[in-house]
Amino acid sequence: MAMGISVEFIFLTLTLTLVLAPLVSANSEGDALYTLRRSLSDPDNVLQSWDPTLVTPCTWFHITCDQDNHVTRVDLGNSNLSGHLVPELEKLEHLQYLELYKNNIQGQIPVELGNLKSLISLDLYNNNISGIIPPALGKLKSLVFLRLNDNRLNGQIPRELGVISSLKVVDVSNNNLCGTIPTTGPFEHIPLNKTVYCTSLCRIGPPTYCGGCAQSTLFTVESWQSVELPSSAAMTF
């Protein structure tokens, strides 16, 4: 009898664990998203449905989940939001698309975004984000689209981005970047006749090396000619 109770107890425990595990994960993701909500000003009440008392954030507007109730998309582009990003976003372990473009997001890009291993698209363009592009973004091995243009980013394009073999589109135009454009990995495959627009950015290659942060140049990959141009780096691979 005792043995029967023990087996039944173990079976019940395992069943509850399997049932509740996705809910625990969903709550963790909901907590992370609600932390983001609290860091943002939302005059148009776009985030009104983000209720932390719900079991899962999958019913919230602008959130998409997979069949296991894991958050896979955050779509908040052009939503008149201001405020800053939060490191808790790293808890969205299954996130594939983070779309926060055309808002007034300020502050820096959290280093913790580099832990979003499933991320395919990071779109933070047309905001007011400052600081550097975190080298930790080089850990995003599934990343295809990286659009950070039209912000106030400074520093260099991290060399770590050159190891992301899946990367197809990088746009960091209209920032305050300087230094050299990486030449490894996907950065080697800018198609001929495509143009790389730079402000204080340059490529290492014939016939010119222009390291540093003073010279504005335009490079055409096919001919390596340069002319003055007041823009910043925009690359499509």
Image (cartoon, helix red, strand yellow):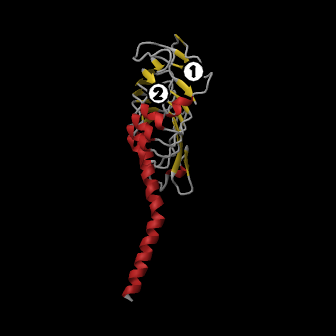
Q: Is residue 101 visible?
A: no
Quadrant including the C terminus: top right
Residue 155's spot in the image, x, y percent?
39, 24
**Residue sticking out furthest to the front:** 206
The Cα atoms of the two marked residues, 2 and 1, are separated by 13 Å
**Residue sticking out furthest to the bottom:** 1
Q: Which mark identifies residue 182?
A: 2
**Residue sticking out furthest to the right:** 193
Kindly state the secondary structure of the residue where label 1 is placed.
loop
Nearer the observer, 86 or 140: 140
Mark 2 residue crowding within 10 angstroms, few (<14) / some (14–19) / many (20+): some
Residue shown at 52%/55% (left/top)?
Answer: 69
Q: Quadrant of residue 192?
A: top right
Residue shown at 53%/57% (left/top)?
Answer: 68
Residue 54's spot in the image, x, y percent?
48, 54
Nearer the observer, 40 or 172: 172
- Which amino acid, mark 2? Pro
Kindly state the secondary structure of the residue where label 2 is placed.
loop
Look at mark 1 in the image and give the residue it sits on.
Answer: 221
Residue 8's spot in the image, x, y percent?
43, 80
**Residue sticking out furthest to the left:** 2
Residue shown at 39%/31% (left/top)?
Answer: 108
- Which amino acid, mark 1? Val
